[in-house]
Amino acid sequence: MKKFRFKSVVQLANMKLSVKNAAIVLASSTLVSALLGLFRDRLLNSYYLGTYPTGIDAYTAAFTIPDFMFFILTSGALSVSFIPVFNQRLGAGNKKSAWELSSSLINLLALISLVVSVLIMIFADPLIRYIVSPGLDESGMILAINMTRVIALNPFLFSIATVLTSIQQAVGRFVFYAFAPAIYNIGIIIGITCFTGGINLFGVEIFEGGIMGVAIGVILGAVMQLIVALIGLFGLGFDYDFKIYWRNQGFRSILKLLPARSMDQGIDYVNSIVNTNLSSRMGAGAVRSFNQASALHHMPVNLIGVAISTAFFPKLTEELNDGDRTEFYKTFRKALRTIIWIALPVAAIAFFARGYVVSFISNIGNNDSNGTIASVLGTLVIAIFARSVFHIASRGFYACQDTKTPFIVSIVAIGATILMSIGFYLAGWGVDGLGLAQSLGAVLEIVVLLGILQKRSNGKILNKEFGGVFLRMLFATFIASCVAFSMTKFIPLMATDNSLVITIPKFCIIASVSVLSYLIASFFLNIDEVQPILNYVKKILFKNAK
């Protein structure tokens, strides 16, 4: 009976979802993952940021090379290259080719990433010492090297899981794909709470504990994420074969598309390596402070830009496969307007309430550390908007199986960002300069991408109606910003506010009043995006009325 119930739950979760429901699931899972990430960081910061800043800097630096290699090998490179080709095979009824394609990708990426993981373990010392974080002291350097060797398994585990979840995403299954990152965070939380005190097996100490226990939790989370990805294949009929079908035309097509997107991801992450390198030279705790501000600004980006654009992407590819450019433009514009309408007020609230946001991940009472994180977050609010828009802008190209154009644009934008980062560092602007460079580079990237899309569509994507709506959205955001600023003065953040019981209610009041003002302004400015929310509210309030 229990087995039947479990099977039923999995079958229900694996149902194909509409774009609307997929966006809801993705946004909800991203929110859950973000909340778990906040809790994870709060634990880490309370344990180490105030008492052992060198250790937390080393832990942060240890992710740099494994994450870099994963981004190059797999990450977004696979999903945007794999899904259009995979959908073409399924749409033509050629399941055999689709499964051969999937098996080939799993096997190839598993072999390559395993070799990469081993190489990272071997060359961790020079990579950390001379490239990633040369500014760490010797104790921090050794700790970062050792943790890098543990976390080096991530590219291998992540690559397999990403292929499996990409298959699910391609066929409209989003539940297990969406919640896999949350499971990863749970593994790290287990490492913080259970492994930092050491690991004993049958009374024998096999691990003495410390911050290295967190690195072990990272690997545990990656394994748990892979298991969730495997469960998501249930009932799909996936015919796996331990073989690489080099003659499969779909596989060959992906191999042609993959390099440009992989290099795009790699170039983008070079920026992170530069930031880690520069911040390691700014004193103990600087690496972690910049990393935390960057992570905070990525949360709304993932919640808005990634979730919405991921949900729309399969529909965009289907419309192009049908040869209907008019519907493609309409769907793209709808996704872009939705992202902009949500991202603008979120960025504004994040700016004025940044002190409250930082208090969610740090309760150490260290005003200097919290102030630094909040200051950097303030410089990254423009990037919240720009990077949210980037995800749908780039997918406009990927749906057309054009990965080269975003790659070239990224090279230019990232190159400009790195130059600005170095220039601001030499000018003595500290970690704030690094954040400002990120925002300016992100704006440059979306301006160029949207400009190219506009030219290719002969002005049909960003029409006059879109321009007028965008200006009205900006005005509504200005009103919400004034409200948010006033609310932060009315409900100030005190130096003693280190408890979530105090800071969360304050933030919720500020955010709620600001969002309400934005919705009201959107209604009076005739912004269509507000109508579904108003209709939903009316349905709740008057559901019992005849």
Image (cartoon, rainbow, N blue to C red):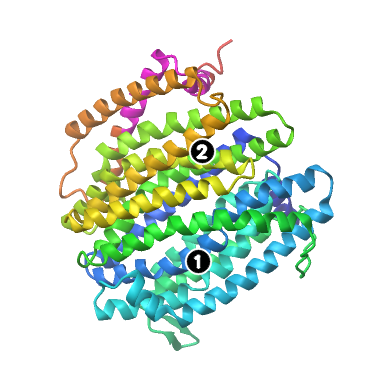
Q: Is residue 528 magenta?
A: yes
Report the amino acid beneath label 2.
Ala
Whole-percent x, y for residue 244 in the image: 75, 67
Q: Which residue is mark 1?
A: 69
Whole-percent x, y for residue 274 in the image: 34, 62
On the question of residue 257 being in view, the answer is yes
Query: In what quadrant of the picture does the N terminus appear?
Result: bottom right
Position of residue 204 relative to residue 226, above or below, is below
Question: What residue is drawn where x is 20% and y is 48%?
Answer: 497
Query: In what quadrant of the picture does the C terminus appear?
Result: top right
Whole-percent x, y for residue 314 in the image: 65, 40
Q: Nearer the viewer, residue 229 or 105?
A: 105
Q: Which residue is mark 2?
A: 393
Q: Which residues are magenta?
A: 511-538
Disc 2 crowd, CA 10 A, few/some/many (<14, 14-19, 20+):
many
Q: Is residue 266 left or right of residue 317?
A: left
Whole-percent x, y for residue 50 in the image: 22, 65
Report the amino acid beneath label 1.
Met
Judged from the image, the secondary structure of the residue bearing numbered disc 1 is helix
